[in-house]
Amino acid sequence: QVQLQESGPGLVKPSETLSLTCSVSGGSINRWCWNWIRQPAGKGLEWIGRLCFSGNANYNANYNPSLNSRVVMSADTSKNQISLILRSLTAADTAVYFCATGNSFDFWGQGTLVTVSS
Amino acid sequence: EIVLTQSPGTLSLSPGDSATLSCRASQSVNSNSLAWYQQKPGQAPRLLIYHASTRAPGIPDTFSGSGSGTDFTLTISRLEPGNFAVYYCHQYGSSPDTFGQGTKLEI
């Protein structure tokens, strides 16, 4: 069974750039699609984007338009990791960030809390 | 984007009861690409149902999904204490993916 583990800085200052990593074990990342989803404290879920492989190392990503082109997802097959970059952070980006597999999200990481504060 | 509206917002029931949760889409969900998740405090969501009515591996048959087009239902029969949680629907048939706002199932 595939397992996912998110990692990141925890605390980021406003206007800075967030970089998160999803480390995958139990299978090669180029077999599935990968998603980032976030959840502010006490609130609902928001889909950030999906990255899908179309060949051994080729992939395409699409993103939620609500993030206004601030987001980029990438993959490192040598490390079996998926990455998320989110630019120009504000307090509204404070949330738990999850990575998850597939189109319907079969497997999830436990999430990592990101706080945007000076 | 497709807006998903879940009802009720909160459902108060007792162990042994049956629960019916609704998810209504603002437009038809392509290929019935609708999933349901359960989330407990401090945990990641867990996939229960995908493709509107297919149970995910390991999910007991007390959970069932139905519906098509714009109206979908999650039914939980014979509620157990571990079933009391927040439930979300999610459509993945049209980009961007969207979630409902959640239904809290409480004792």
Image (cartoon, coloured by chain):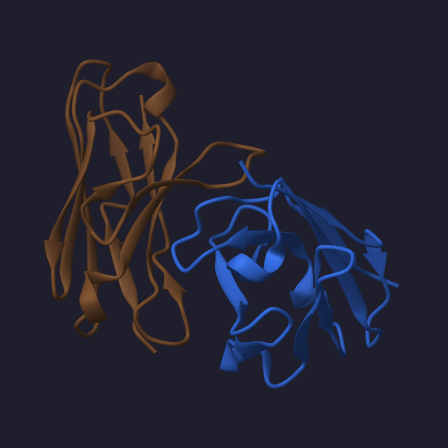
Chain colours: A blue, B brown
B47 to the left or right of B30: right
Q: Nearer the viewer, residue B23 or B96?
A: B96
Total labels drawn: 0
Q: Position of residue B88 (x, y in %)?
A: 35, 48
Q: Quadrant of the N terminus of chain B?
A: bottom left
Q: Is residue B29 visible?
A: no
B101 versus A86 height, above or below: above
> Which quadrant holds residue B92?
bottom left
Q: Residue at x 15, y 25 (%)?
A: B18
Question: What residue do we see at 39% from left, 76% from top?
Answer: B95
Residue occupying image coordinates x 75% and y 73%: A89
Which quadrant of the figure has residue B68? Answer: bottom left
- Residue A2 is left or right of residue B58, and the answer is right
Q: Position of residue B60 (x, y in %)?
A: 26, 25
Rendered-image quadrant of the C terminus of chain B: top left
Whether B43 is drawn above or below B16: the answer is below
Instruction: Tell me if residue A14 comes above or below residue B7 in the rendering.
Output: below
Residue B50 at x, y = what percent? 28, 49
Image position of A65 (left or right of B31)? right
Q: Give the side of residue B104 with respect to residue A46, left or right.
A: left
The outermost residue toward the bottom is A69
Q: Position of residue A27 (x, y in %)?
A: 60, 46
* Pick the front one: A110 or A78: A78
Decide: is B45 above or below A49.
Answer: above
Residue B73 in view: yes
Q: Residue at x 35, y 26 (%)?
A: B84
